[in-house]
Amino acid sequence: MYRVECSSSVNALFGNPESWNSLSDGIPFRQTRWLKPWWDQFGDALEAYVVVARDDQGQICGILPLCRQLASPRTLRFMGDNNACTDFASILLDSGATAAQSIVAQSIVDAMVQFLCLHAGSDSYGWDFLELDGVSAADPVMRCFSASLAKAGVIVHAQSRMSTWFLKSAESWEQQLSNHSKRTRKKTKGFLEAVDKTPGMQRVLAQSSEQVDEFMDAMIELHQRRWNAVGEPGSYADKRLRDFVIQMAHEMFEHERLYLPVLRLDGRIIGGELGILSDNQLYIYSSGFDLDASDLEPGRILAVNTHKYVHDQGLRGIEYMRGDEPYKPRSGAEPTPLLQLRVVAPRWWAKVCHSAWSAQFELKQWARRRTGRELVKVVDMALTS
């Protein structure tokens, strides 16, 4: 029913963003507004390996957006991989095919798996491993993909080191507050009133391209200063990542998907959040706060105002994305394991390499047990419900 091909002309596919984005299920990290800036910054050392499924009318109905590392072992990864932290990476399918038990979804995924297995040893499309990061354990399409690979006799190892965190909106703001203690409710009210009650303080949302540049530069600088203060390089030490995030922010702004508030004190920016809007929720990607203004708690002020903004806009909630920082469960957000999938090509050499990798993984798990450290969670993705 479906014809599957592999394209290395990613710009041709990105050149039709409406077709690509219509398969994204509304998740911004699967869309060209995110992936094209990433490719512009990081694609020079990679080969695009985009698996495309077409129906009998020639229409694109599925996309597996990969890129290939040509050095041995030949490894396929999701576009958006590396410290860009592209969460919710997946196979892109037509919205009518994304239900977990959909026969259409199963047929498209099976056709992609058949293509990957058939060409694993070829010169043009060969691969040894798929290293897929940013996969949600709750993603039915990736569960379907894992089950199809397992059915084909392909080894799939799925592990989780952290979760994404979603804070669901209640029916009303009052109901949301009622989930917290009296002390927390009082502090929340204080943070909401802080902007009006603190002389010289303003909360401003980016409303122009010039403000996007100004606010992004300030947020990144504050983010870096915070991490540098504890001896860490910070995410934006990589200039390419910084350039990617700024380019992406402009793409989102042009399409009215950017949420970029800053907190000013006497004109100076003391805090900022970088968020991305979908049709029904807000994703918080990055933030930065001035350590010199920590007594004012700019981070808490922005966070509480963002929470109220989500309610006022009628959005279903806030996705805080990867990372198990204490403030996320404290806010009432619920976790979903974020997975790394390692898929082994059905070739003897790749299986031998994986055996060595598995032995090393088990040795590290043993060392964690002996030292009392938390084990890396191993998930049978094909059976996850």
Image (cartoon, grey):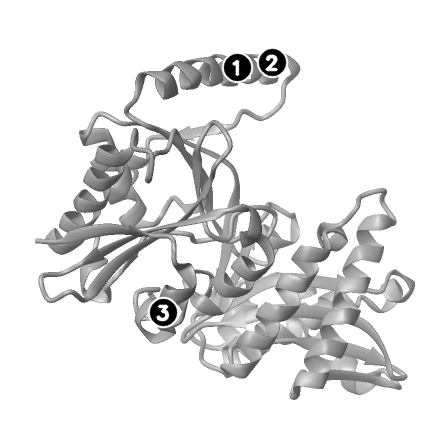
Number of the front mark, 2 or 3: 3
Question: Looking at the image, which is closer to me, 374 or 113?
Answer: 113
Q: CA distance from mark 1 to mark 3?
A: 40 Å
Q: Which residue is mark 1?
A: 360
Seen in the picture, residue 126 relative to 207 is either above or below; the reply is above
- Which quadrant of the view contains residue 224? bottom right
Helix or strand or loop: what does disc 2 sit on? helix
Residue 327 horizontal side relative to residue 114, left or right: right
Residue 322 horizontal side relative to residue 188, left or right: left
Disc on res. 101: none
User: Mark 1 or mark 2, which has the lower sequence index?
Assistant: 1
Question: Looking at the image, which is closer to me, 138 or 222?
Answer: 222
Q: Residues within 10 Å of mark 1 (few under 14, many from 20)?
A: few
The residue type indicated by label 1 comes to Gln
Seen in the picture, residue 291 relative to 151 is either above or below; the reply is below
User: Mark 2 or mark 3, which has the lower sequence index?
Assistant: 3
Proximity of marks 1 and 2: CB atoms separated by less than 8 Å = no
Residue 97 horizontal side relative to residue 178, left or right: left
Helix or strand or loop: what does disc 1 sit on? helix
Q: Residue 289 appears at what percent x and percent y?
A: 79, 64
Seen in the picture, residue 382 relative to 289 is either above or below; the reply is above
Q: CA distance from mark 2 to mark 3?
A: 44 Å
Q: Which residue is mark 2?
A: 367
Number of the front mark, 1 or 3: 3
Identify which residue is drawn at 15% across, 53% down: 3
Seen in the picture, residue 112 relative to 349 is either above or below; the reply is below
Helix or strand or loop: what does disc 3 sit on? helix
Q: Which residue is mark 3?
A: 21
The residue type indicated by label 3 comes to Asn
